[in-house]
Image (tube, rainbow, N blue to C red):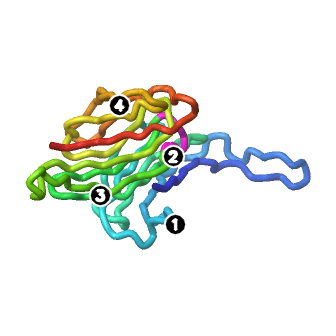
């Protein structure tokens, strides 16, 4: 994951004599920011689809390649923070964990992202169950891109507690998956398993 910020700071300039900003235009025109996955250093050599979370707009978009862009219009002093995550694909499942959707650096909560994996049936054949795992900080609203919706989300209870299933919300049109992470126990990160039957 990577983070890109867009800020409208037109209309002011730094005054080196007074060490303050001078307002040159109290009402500068709106600007349009264009952000691409290639703007993230760690994604410059990635080839594939990406999911883009817009923090202020609280919205999710997908981009077909790292050369595609998200555009946002900003008025004076407005800003937007974009978290960009590569989309993993396995069979019918597309998946990109974003992080805590209400934090400025949403992806900063993610400590580890596992690859999508196909489960093997008891007969040793490839099954229809696909799973992914993440290790993340909490509490808060975790957001991800998922198509289709998962069958279940299981969180490790931590510190000897039994794992439990988490309720989730899913928006089919955008693939936005969200669920609430509880408080951490003894400052242990959450281990979360997502599965698609």
Estimate how packed mark 4 is, as few (under 14), some (14 to 19) or many (20 or more) residues with alpha carbons within 10 Å: few
Q: Where 45 sits versus 54, above or below?
A: below
Which mark, residue 41? 1
Q: CA distance from mark 3 to mark 2?
A: 22 Å
- The percent coordinates of residue 162 (x first, y second) are 37, 28
Q: Secondary structure at mark 3?
A: strand
Please say whether residue 104 is one of the residues in the magenta stretch. Answer: yes
Please say whether residue 176 is one of the residues in the magenta stretch. Answer: no
If you read the primary sequence from the N terminus, does the residue marked by circle 4 or circle 2 appear first?
Answer: 2
In the image, which residues are magenta? 102-109
Mark 4 = which residue? Answer: 163
If you read the primary sequence from the N terminus, does the residue marked by circle 1 or circle 4 appear first?
Answer: 1
Q: Nearer the viewer, mark 3 or mark 1?
A: 3
Q: Nearer the viewer, mark 3 or mark 2?
A: 3
Q: CA distance from mark 2 to mark 1?
A: 16 Å
Q: Secondary structure at mark 2?
A: strand
Which mark, residue 88? 3
Given residues 177 and 182, the one toward you in this image is 182
């Amino acid at each position: 994951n990577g983070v890109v910020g867009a800020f409208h700071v037109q209309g002011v300039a730094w005054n080196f004599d007074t060490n303050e900003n001078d307002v040159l235009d109290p009402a500068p025109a709106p600007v349009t920011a264009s952000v691409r996955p290639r703007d993230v250093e760690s994604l410059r050599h990635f080839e594939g689809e990406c999911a883009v979370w817009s923090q202020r707009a609280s919205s999710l978009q997908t981009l077909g390649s790292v050369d595609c862009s998200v555009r946002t219009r900003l008025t004076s002093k407005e800003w937007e923070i974009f978290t960009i995550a590569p989309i993993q694909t396995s069979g019918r499942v597309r998946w990109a964990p974003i992080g805590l959707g209400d934090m400025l650096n949403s992806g900063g909560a993610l400590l580890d992202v596992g690859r999508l994996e196909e489960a093997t049936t008891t007969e040793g054949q490839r099954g229809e169950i696909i799973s992914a795992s993440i290790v993340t900080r909490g509490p808060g609203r975790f957001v991800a891109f998922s198509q289709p919706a998962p069958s279940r989300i299981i969180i490790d209870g931590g510190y000897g507690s039994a794992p439990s299933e988490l309720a989730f919300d899913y928006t089919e049109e955008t693939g936005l998956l969200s669920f609430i992470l509880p408080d951490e126990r003894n400052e242990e990160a959450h281990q979360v398993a997502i599965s698609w039957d």
